[in-house]
Amino acid sequence: MSDNKLVYIKRVGTNDGESRIMAMLNASPLDGDPRNHTVPILDTFQDDEDSSISYIVMPFLRLTHNPPFTNVGEIVDFADQFLEGLAFMHEHCVAHRDCSEKNLMMDATAMYPLGFHPVKHTFLPDCNTPARSSIIPRSVAGVRYYFVDFGISSFIPPDAPSKLVLGLDGRDQDVPELSDEDPYDPFKVDIFTIGNVFRRLFYDDFSNMEFLAPLIESMTREDPAQRPTAAEALRQWTAIRKRISIFSLLWRLKRRNEGRIASVVADAKDLPHVSRQWLNWLIGRR
């Protein structure tokens, strides 16, 4: 690329379902909506020798947990962006159908002012210098999260005779209704999958994620009909979020397997940092 930025190039079928859905979500005016968390398309081109093959050029993104989350507020921002993006996608008749951890990614450019190596992610572009000393925390730098890989996604317009699909594909095989024989609602699959991401990435690992419990419970219900829509899940989350104090947002993540003494020591180390951030927040409100 002329600006020397890292990109990812994906081979797709020319004008296949994935290409059409991504193009629609990247077209004006949807591309300018801040709720849209579809991975941006930077360019497309057709294969010189085989017109049935095309390529989509996208920003080079990182997995959301690399580098690891450090405080509660970072996870709240993750939930904000992906629930907002899911509601937007469903509003525009697209069911992703595979929005598990590896298809949720982030643009971490702001966290790495000196860049990073595309293969050895923990190093600078020279592949020799560790990047850790130059990383800016995501809570300071700000990151943008994106849905990627629309390979099995479905566009189902409001006037479609059926809004049900078939298929066993998808990384998250915990979804109970997946079937090749019994049609199911793909939008409710997305709800379950995102709820399961919240459970596996955060709730199961960290003890100060209890506020996620009611949202996870509703999103991962066995019966798809009992799960909320994406818009309802976003409203439920917004109500939960309002009850999380600024002090809690700034606090470090506590692993469930932390020993009591280790936890007290870690809390003592974190308290001065959290207190400074809290005071800065109070001053900023005046």
Image (tube, rainbow, N blue to C red):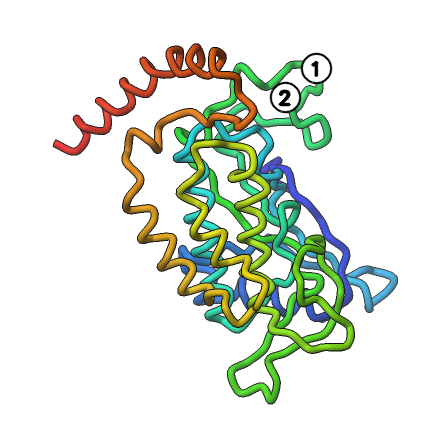
Judging from the image, what secondary structure is the residue with disc 2 in? loop
105 vs 35: above or below: above
Q: Position of residue 107 (x, y in %)?
A: 54, 40
Q: Position of residue 73 (x, y in %)?
A: 39, 35
Q: How many marks?
A: 2
> Disc 1 marks which residue?
128
Which residue is situated farthest in the left direction here? 286
Judging from the image, what secondary structure is the residue with disc 1 in? loop
In the rendered structure, which amino acid carries the disc numbered 2? Leu
> Disc 2 marks which residue?
124
206 vs 36: above or below: above
Choose top left, top right, bottom left or bottom right for residue 124: top right
> Which residue is depicted at the point 51% across and 39% down?
203
Crowding near pointer 1: few (<14 within 10 Å), some, many (20+)? Answer: few
Q: Position of residue 128 (x, y in %)?
A: 70, 15
Q: Are marks 1 and 2 in contact (CB under 8 Å)?
A: yes
82 vs 176: above or below: above
